[in-house]
Image (spheres, rainbow, N blue to C red):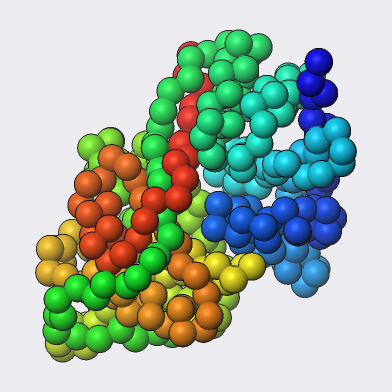
Amino acid sequence: MTAVPTLHFCTDPGEFLAAAEAYLAADPVVNTVVATVTRRMAARRAEGVALPEDDWWLVVRDASGAVVGAAMRTAPFPPRPPFLLPMPPEAAVALAREWHRRGERVRAVNGALPAVRACADEVARLDGGRVEVAQHTRLHLLGHLTPPAPVPGALRAATAGDVGLVAAWFGAFMADADEQAGRPRGTSAHETPDRAELLRRIRDGRVWFWTDGSGAPVHLTAANPTSFGVARVGPVYTPPGQRGRGWAGNAVAEVCRLLTAEGARVCLFTDQANPVSNRLYARLGFRPVVDMANLTLGD
């Protein structure tokens, strides 16, 4: 009989990193979300910022003690979906059973397939509900960059004085993405960084505008801090009135040049229901790595 992997929960991001750092570093592209979020929260804690008491991280170990999976529940937006990295299916099922045992209500689960589906199915079996797909996403890694046809304008880094526009475009990004994918606006729950976090990203040089020939911002591309040699681009947002003019392709290509010049590998997520963005990134040289899903537990 195969031993069920063991689950170790912790509430300290530093403790989690100490246990899982080698695992995260072994596949830093697939593990990008957990790596960047956890490092950001560990830095906040080191600065004296109190983290939510009900946040947790999970290390999954096999019978030999080797780390074979990880997860976290840090999303600040309802219903606070846990995020699962690849793990053995029996571990994903055991995780759902542990939530049920300790009375932790989970009505949405995000992360890598097939683990996230196995987990959500077990949550539905134990706690009721029907598993529904809110969003299918795909993680891509940049291979050889193929620049698009040039357009007027240039990339410039956002400054602290731009934080209002940055906040507005960050906030509009997911609702517009829902609409482009054929979903009702607001379907996809997501985190909109607060002003302090946006200023931190701006000061770290991780937010850029594409400006048109007159110098006016017409597009935003951002990126997360590099973690284990990988930088994840996003969000990528063009206001409706500026779409179809080549701003996004040129901005993303230029940001990719900057990130690769720093020595980073570049990845990004696409919504599988948005053919426009998928075609754009494929033309730039991004190639699929792993499929993920945001699943909800409907009544």
Q: Is residue 122 left or right of residue 298?
A: right
- Left or right: 55 as drawn, with respect to 145: right
Tally of numbered discs: 0
Of residue 4 and residue 225, the one placed in the foreground of this image is: 4
Q: Position of residue 30 (x, y in %)?
A: 55, 52
Return the residue found at the far bottom.
Answer: 214
Residue located 26% across and 45% down the image: 274
Query: Residue placed farthest to the right in the image?
Result: 64
Q: Position of residue 195 (x, y in %)?
A: 52, 68
Identified at 48% across, 56% down, the residue is: 192
Seen in the picture, residue 90 relative to 212 is either above or below; the reply is above
> Of 192 and 130, which appears nearest the observer?
130
Observer-nearest of 280 and 64: 64
Residue 206 percent across, percent down from the top left: 48, 76
Reply above or below: 25 against 89: below
The part of the image, by quadrant, that contains residue 61 is top right
